[in-house]
Amino acid sequence: MYAEVDFLLALIKDDDWLGEAAEVVYQKHRDDLWTSQFTLIELLLVAYREDRDTERVIANAAALLDVRGDVDTVVAAATYVEDHGFTPFDALHLVESAGDTIVSSDRAYEGFALRRDLRDGREE
């Protein structure tokens, strides 16, 4: 059974109005539940928007059920969000770049990756 982000939020958040229903489903179907890396990415965005500890939220969600796809990338991105102030998508781009030069006008990558700056055409 595929778990969407609202289900995981209901399990993780203490004050979610769907929390009790989600807990019942989780207890009954724990072994059949799974989700994708895309649910974790959406959860990363929500946690960031709500100023929650993104690293903890993603790690806890990934521990609740089977996640199909590239979990390590999302967990690593959550670490960059939490520890270095990256936005979720900048963090995902950084992790996915795997050390390659990033072509971008965004200065967020300075000190973390080589960047080809589109504003002036030079590499930093």
Image: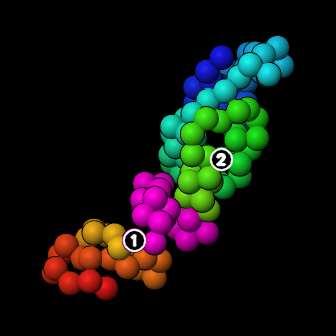
Q: Which of marks 1 and 2 is nearer the N terminus?
A: 2
Disc 2 element:
helix
Q: In this rendering, would 12 be left or right of 2?
A: right
Front position in the image: 123 or 25: 123
Distance of mark 1 from mark 2, alpha carbons? 25 Å
Disc 1 element:
loop
Residue at (46, 82) in percent of width and height: 111
Measured as percent of width and height from the top left, residue 71 is found at 61, 46
Front position in the image: 29 or 96: 96
Can you say whether 96 is above or below 112 in the image? above
Across the whole image, how many numbered discs are drawn on residues? Answer: 2
Measured as percent of width and height from the top left, residue 9 is found at 64, 33
Measured as percent of width and height from the top left, residue 6 is found at 59, 27
- Kind of residue sitting beneath label 1: Asp
- Kind of residue sitting beneath label 2: Ile
Residue at (82, 14) in percent of width and height: 28
Find disc 1 in the rendering and name its residue. Answer: 100
Question: Hey, which residue is sitting farthest right in the picture?
Answer: 27
Measured as percent of width and height from the top left, residue 50 is found at 56, 47
Q: In which quarter of the image is the C terminus?
A: bottom left
The range drawn in magenta is: 80-100
Front position in the image: 66 or 28: 66
Find disc 2 in the rendering and name its residue. Answer: 58
Residue 17 can be seen, yes or no: no
Question: Foreground mark, 1 or 2?
Answer: 1
Q: In this rendering, would 107 be left or right of 16?
A: left
